[in-house]
Image (cartoon, rainbow, N blue to C red):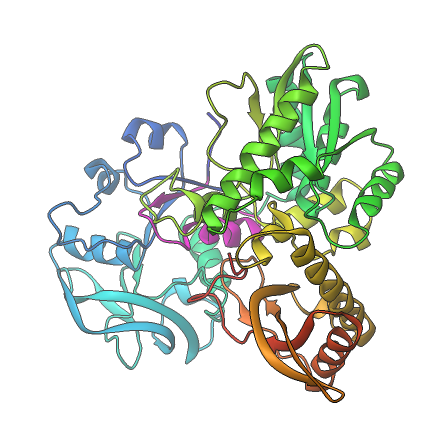
Amino acid sequence: MKQVPILVLDFGSQYTQLIARKLRESGVYCEVVPYREDIESIKARKPQGIILSGGPASVYAPDAYKPDDEIWDLGLPIMGICYGMQLITQHFGGEVVPATHHEYGKAKLSISESPIFKGMSDNKTVWMSHGDKAEKLPEGFEVIGTSENSPYAAIANEEKKIYAFQFHPEVHHTEEGTKLLKNFAKYICGCSSTWNMGSFAKEKIKAIQEQVGDKKVLCGVSGGVDSSVVAALLHEALPKEQLICVFVDQGLLRKDEAKQVQDMFKLLDIPLITIDAKDEFMKALKGVTDPEQKRKAIGEKFIEVFDKEASKHTDVEFLAQGTLYTDVIESVSVKGPSKTIKSHHNVGGLPDWMTFELVEPLREIFKDEVRKLGLELGLPKHMLERHPFPGPGLAIRVMGEVNEEALRLLRESDAIMQDELRASGYYNKVWQAFTVLLNVQSVGVMGDNRTYDNTVCIRMVESVDGMTATFAHVPHDVLERMSRRIINEIDGINRVVYDISSKPPATIEWE
């Protein structure tokens, strides 16, 4: 087992993987393991420091999540975040109680002199998300940071090199949060910044070669960033005859997308098999209105189609997928006790009747890192800058049952919105933009006639990693042009609305 400079124990926070992403962004390799990780496994990784993540539980609850007691005796620097802070407080003899007022959102942090704050500014914004608080500090700890509602916003035992924060430095909204994490790794733990996407690519290419051997891999591609990077990585790692790239046109793609996918793979010189499965997918979705059932139906159909294609080839033992960290976090807690937000069609393994073994080279990285990896592999920049597109496609952007008419309205409205977004220069200024068909009719007037037609919602967000997002402040005149063209050019739509909710509490996609 290779050395891991920083090890994160996951206590179930939806933000846990962001800690790893921020540290890797700073060049420090980091892994996330469950809070209950065996002490011998922790020792085998030879960490230089440990971070205890946040989590949804309370440390004083009878079934509270607790790490192996021996971690406190390793003599390593430790950082605790939110729940992790409360664990540290409790373990060393302090007191944790329910807060009178829960604290969620932004706060201003006032800091004291400490090596953990090296090069940081006072009175910066931090992100709070907690319902418990430290009431009494343990012996040997002192306050090094306060906020208006948190007198113990940051505490430390400098002698033991133990630091604890009530706020979340890993969240994008915390100013200088990355610097705080880097300070812990560099100045407190003595880690060096040697990890990057170039080294990750080499590691993954070697790992793919070791896993696959001389067998064949079936790689499902959608034309999106994730699956394209997976295909390029496999293409780099394996001889052409071992890689079978399959593009399933399931009828849930954006306008002209099937042709764009085929053209792109020709450019990459990667052979591509295209399967027209529109009828099969529409049949599987007939009568389905529940979002989770849509995702499951699409996932099951994808697997069926791949299995059928694989049976045409010999020695196919592996199925490659573009699973990302965010997919895993939002679907099921595989490394800790985090709560499920929604399932993803490419997470959770394969059904028992399939004989494939999964190859998931992107499972431990985030969308922004995938784009950097794509550049390392030589993929065209314009392809990597495409906005994220969900695996289930347009099916989860149609509220209610999916049918051909709903898909027509969605495709045409999305194409117009994208066209105006590019023309305005805002395409690369927002993280993701799309339209949603609400399947809600309302009264309108066109000319002298009354209409009773559909409503389309435009959704545009700004984000770094997809874990948190704010709605994009696009100029009103750009939105007005989008609305005018959608209503004037598409029969069946008479109203356009704009989504101004952020994540959390909303998600980016509507389903």
Which residue does the image show at 13% across and 52% down from the upper left? 61
Q: Position of residue 242 (x, y in %)?
A: 74, 18
Quadrant housing residue 274: top right
Which residue does the image show at 16% across and 64% down from the upper left? 137
Using the rendered image of the protein, determine whether residue 202 is visible from the camera's viewpoint: yes
Q: Position of residue 511 (x, y in %)?
A: 51, 56
Is 489 left or right of 104, judged from the image as shown?
Answer: right
Q: Is residue 122 above or below residue 316?
A: below
Tally of marks: 0
Near-viewer residue (318 or 196): 318
Q: Is residue 169 magenta?
A: no
Which residue does the image show at 36% across and 67% down from the upper left? 114
Q: Is residue 24 magenta?
A: yes
Near-viewer residue (375 or 75): 375
Residue furthest to the front: 449
Which residue does the image show at 69% across and 11% down from the upper left? 214
Quadrant housing residue 235: top right
Near-viewer residue (240 or 124): 240
Using the rendered image of the protein, determine whether residue 230 is visible from the camera's viewpoint: no
Q: Is residue 78 above or below residue 103?
A: above
Q: Position of residue 5 (x, y in %)?
A: 46, 40
Q: Position of residue 415 (x, y in %)?
A: 77, 63
Give the extent of the magenta segment.
5-28
Is 245 left or right of 76, judged from the image as shown?
Answer: right
